[in-house]
Image: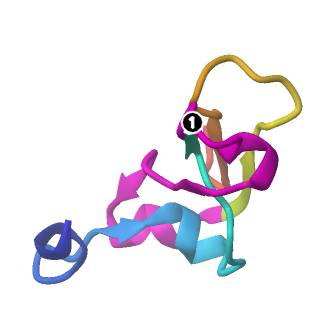
């Protein structure tokens, strides 16, 4: 990851839009991690610099619990 996000020039699209702390996409099934919001953000969209600049909105869908992961949604402003 360090190489991809460093010398290779790719970006974490989520962090292009949001710098808020404590935003996770995975929680352990132990110790009430979901309830306490103690997790990791292990789901990424690694994108080129051009696409990173088009990232406009991010959302971690936690309204419904599907598994120990939550879907990561990123909106891009790109022509179709």
Is residue 58 positioned above or below 27 on the image? below
Residue shown at the point (25%, 74%) measured from the top left: 5
Is residue 47 positioned above or below 34 on the image? below
| Most distant residue in the top direction | 66
In the rendered view, does 52 fall on the left or right side of 78?
left
Snapshot quadrant of residue 71: top right
Coloration of the structure image: rainbow
Look at the image and give the residue range highlighted in magenta.
28-55
Residue 31 sits inside the magenta stretch: yes
Mark 1 is surrounded, within 10 Å at the Cα level, by few (under 14), some (14 to 19) or many (20 or more) other residues, namely few
Residue 35 sits inside the magenta stretch: yes
Query: Camera-side residue: 12 or 64?
Result: 64
Image location of residue 72, percent across then percent down: 61, 42
Image location of residue 14, percent across then percent down: 56, 63
Q: Secondary structure at mark 1?
A: loop
Snapshot quadrant of residue 56: bottom right
Question: Where is the C terminus found, in terms of image quarters?
Answer: top right
Residue shown at the point (43%, 49%) measured from the top left: 42
Question: Where is the N terminus found, in terms of image quarters?
Answer: bottom left
Residue shown at the point (42%, 66%) measured from the top left: 12
Is residue 8 positioned above or below 30 on the image? below
Query: Camera-side residue: 43 or 30?
Result: 30
Snapshot quadrant of residue 8: bottom left
Query: Camera-side residue: 17 or 80?
Result: 17
Image location of residue 31, percent across then percent down: 63, 43
| Most distant residue in the right direction | 63
Residue shown at the point (17%, 67%) measured from the top left: 4
The residue that label 1 is drawn on is 30
Image location of residue 58, percent across then percent down: 71, 56
């Amino acid at each position: 990851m360090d190489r991809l996000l460093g010398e290779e020039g790719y970006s974490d699209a989520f962090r292009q839009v949001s710098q808020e702390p404590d935003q996770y996409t995975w929680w352990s099934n132990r110790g009430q991690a979901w309830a306490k919001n103690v997790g990791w953000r292990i789901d990424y969209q690694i994108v080129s610099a051009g696409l990173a600049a088009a990232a406009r909105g991010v959302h971690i869908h936690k309204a419904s619990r599907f598994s120990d992961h939550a879907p990561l949604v990123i909106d891009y402003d790109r022509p179709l």
